[in-house]
Image (tube, rainbow, N blue to C red):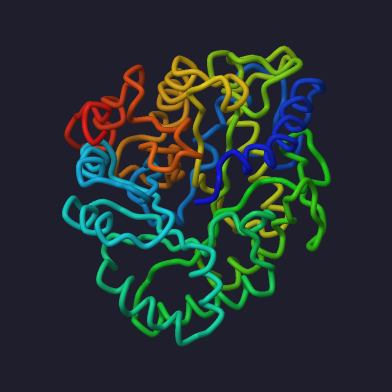
Amino acid sequence: MKRRVMVGLVVLAVAVLVGVSVLVDDRPHTDANPNVDVGPVPGSYAAKVPTAYQHKFSPFSASVGICHETDNETLAQLSAIAKNFKMMHIYRYDEQALQIAQKNNMEILLGTDIKVGISFATQEIADTYVRTRILPYKNVIKAICIGNEPNIDKTFIDSKTFARIASHVSKALKKNKLDIPVTVNLVFGCTASLYPPSRVTFKPAGSVNNGIYSPIPYIQTIASVNPGKPFLFYDFYPNLALGGKVTLQYCLFESGRHPGGVVSCGMFDAQYLSACNATYAVNDKMEVYVAETGWPNAPESGPGGSPENQASYVNYFYNRWVKPQGGPGASNTIPVFLFYAYPNRNSNAVFALFNNSKIDFSQYSEYNGVSISRAGSEGK
């Protein structure tokens, strides 16, 4: 994964605009589709997130997992993750992580390094990769992300190359009779409108804003390679919207009503709804999942950064987003991955969750039906 600090700066401009816009316009909004209506009627917003947006295409059996950076990982870290979560997002092929997943019946969202991803522009390379690295772990790899955030400057893959790569990987999977979907993890941004969430749209394909390229061609590619069950992922960091009228409580899910008057669960919901509706405007069959969401644990790492706020976000996230969707085996849940487990990369260390003793992971492990383990006490 690339430097999170850089991504934070890129996303900040978009997140702040989205957050402030949600607050300054509190007029009622009604749309033909009640599932995307955002209005000030008590309960109208909170009651619809996330349950009204639950989906049917997810290859995952639960709604929440955790991201793991495989650099400098230890076996103890992976074991601790397996004791608390059934789902894990890793950013590149890592045999040790996949073996632990296989041993513990976990489910993997597998990313690819940008160089590896670009190499799939050659069909033979994609064929070899799938045959030698995906096939042996076909039971645990549930989806493959091409690149990681390919629509930003730092990890950019142009849309034409991306389309060729996705097509080659999809063909390679079919050659090996693997029903593993090809998808993408995008940065949400480059929007033509900001509010209300039910009316947010993307700028045209080829547009770029604050280093974020329009998601439109990437959405179209995923729809073409997975025409029956298309889905993709975005990242959401509510703390980046802090400032002005956007309160800490609103970003931490602690308040059901922001100062503008609209009833909601929190900034995460506003960001998620905005991404859903912008995506639906491109392809109304595309389902929207969450590859990363988290909160920094240090003041210098971004707005609102502290161990206390990080713990509050993760604990409230469970109650407001995960729990309402039901436990493992519940149908139509929205996959979400918390960012991230351990500080294995210095640039991302401020987001590490398992070393924060204030976070209650027991609710996540109980939800996932796995052994309860104080993850922070293991694998340091």
Question: Looking at the image, which is closer to me, 249 or 152?
Answer: 152
Picture quadrant where residue 138 is located: bottom left
Is residue 34 visible to the viewer in this orientation of the structure? no
At horizontal 21% and vertical 32% (from top left) the residue drawn is 378
Quarter of image, res 251:
top right
Q: How many marks?
A: 0
The answer to which image quadrant residue 11 occupies is: top right
The answer to whether 331 is drawn above or below residue 370 in the figure is below
271 over 132 or under it: above or below: above
Q: Depth check: give the residue in front, 319 or 354.
A: 354
Instruction: Examine the rendered structure and indicate whether residue 73 appears above or below residue 123.
Output: above
The relative height of residue 169 versus residue 43 in the rendered view (above or below) is below
Q: Image point 74% across, 50% down: which residue?
A: 211
Question: Residue 333 in the image: x percent, y percent?
Answer: 42, 44
Quadrant of the snapshot with the C terminus = top left
Residue at the extreme bottom of the image, as rendered = 124
Indicate the position of residue 65 as horizontal and vertical percent values: 37, 42
Q: Does residue 206 appear in this view?
A: yes
Residue 102 position within the rendered picture, expressed as x and y whole percent measured from the top left: 21, 58
Specify whether 76 is left or right of 268: left
* Residue 265 at x, y percent in the picture: 57, 23
Q: Locate residue 324 relative to residue 190 in the image: left or right.
A: left
Residue drawn where x is 49% and y is 49% of the image? 55
